[in-house]
Amino acid sequence: MKRILAVITAAFITAGASYGAPTYTGAEGYITMPRVDVAGAGRFGLSLKYTFDGFITPAINIVPFNGLEIGAGWDLSANNYGMTPVMANVKLQFVKEAAIGFMMEIPTANYQTFHGTIYLAWEQLFSASGVSDDSATFAIGYTFDRGSDINVFIGIQKSLFIPQLYLVADFSNFPYRFNGSLPHASDNRGVLNLGLRIVPLKWLSFDIAGLDLFDGNRSMMIGVNLYVSLWGGGSK
C-alpha cells in the first residue's frame, strides 16, 4: 500500500509545470484557444468546466511523446441545448516557438456536420518575477466547409503579483465550435475571453473567466484542472 501511495504521489509531484490548461476542445491553452507549448512526454491533463449558461465540459489531453499533444472535450448541456459534437484536437510543436494544429468537431447527431480548423501558431515566452510561463500566442488558421473563413486568434497569460496567480485572455474571430447553440461564443464582433488562473500546486489549477465579453450573451466559466505525469518527466 505504501508503495502504491508513493507512486501516486510521485505522479502528481512530477506533473508538468506548464501552467496552461485543457481548453474546451482539450488543447493545452488559455481559455478557449490553444497555446504553442506542449508539456513533456507522458503528461496527462484533465479539466472540468462549468459555464453559467448551462454547459458542463470535461476535457482531456495527453502527450504520447515530446512535441505531440492529443486532446478532446465535450460540451454537455444542462439546459436542453440538444446534442453537441465531440471536439478534438491534435497539436505538433515542431520548434520551441511554433506549432501546427488541427481542431475538429465530430458529429454526434445526423443534423450536424464535420468541421475542421487547421492553424499555425507561434508563441513568445516571457519571464517575470522568476516565473517563465508568461506567454503570448498568435495564430492564423482556416476552417474547412465554412466558405473562405480565415481565422486568427491571440492568447495571453501573465503572472500577477504572486507566482501562483495569472491573468489569462484570448481573442478570436471564430467560436471554438460551430455546431449547435453556443450562447457564450458569438463571433459577430469577435470572441474575447478574460479571466484568472490560480495555481496553488504544480498539479492543480483553477480558472474563473468571463466569456464573449463584447456581446450581450456574455457568460462566465469556472473550472478545475489536474495534471498527472503517467510516465517520463511530464514537464520540460
Image (cartoon, rainbow, N blue to C red):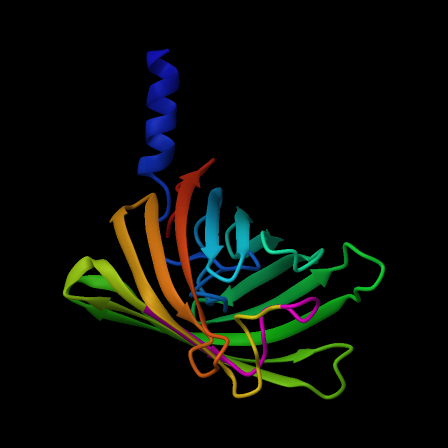
Q: Is residue 74 visible?
A: no
Question: Residue at position x 39%, y 49% from top?
Answer: 224
Question: In the image as oriented, which residue stretches furthest toward the top?
Answer: 1
Q: Is residue 171 magenta?
A: yes
Q: Is residue 3 magenta?
A: no
Quarter the N terminus occupies: top left
The residue range painted magenta reads 168-181
**Quadrant in the rendering for residue 54:** bottom right
Residue 103: % across, % down: 64, 65
**Quadrant in the rendering for residue 14:** top left
Q: Is residue 131 left or right of residue 181?
A: left
Question: Residue at position x 52%, y 88% from top?
Answer: 189
Question: Residue at position x 49%, y 59% from top?
Answer: 23
Depth check: give the residue in front, 203 or 36.
203
Depth check: give the residue in front, 151 or 96.
151
In the rendered view, tell whether residue 196 sits above or below residue 206.
below
The main secondary structure of the magenta stretch is loop
Residue 230: % across, % down: 47, 35
Question: In the image as oriented, which residue stretches furthest toward the front?
Answer: 79
Depth check: give the residue in front, 2 or 94.
2
Count up the numbered dots.
0
Q: Is residue 183 visible?
A: yes
In the rendered view, tell whether residue 143 sits above or below residue 29.
below
Residue 29: % across, % down: 45, 63
Q: Is residue 51 left or right of residue 130?
A: right
Q: Is residue 180 left or right of residue 165?
A: right
Residue 202: % across, % down: 29, 46
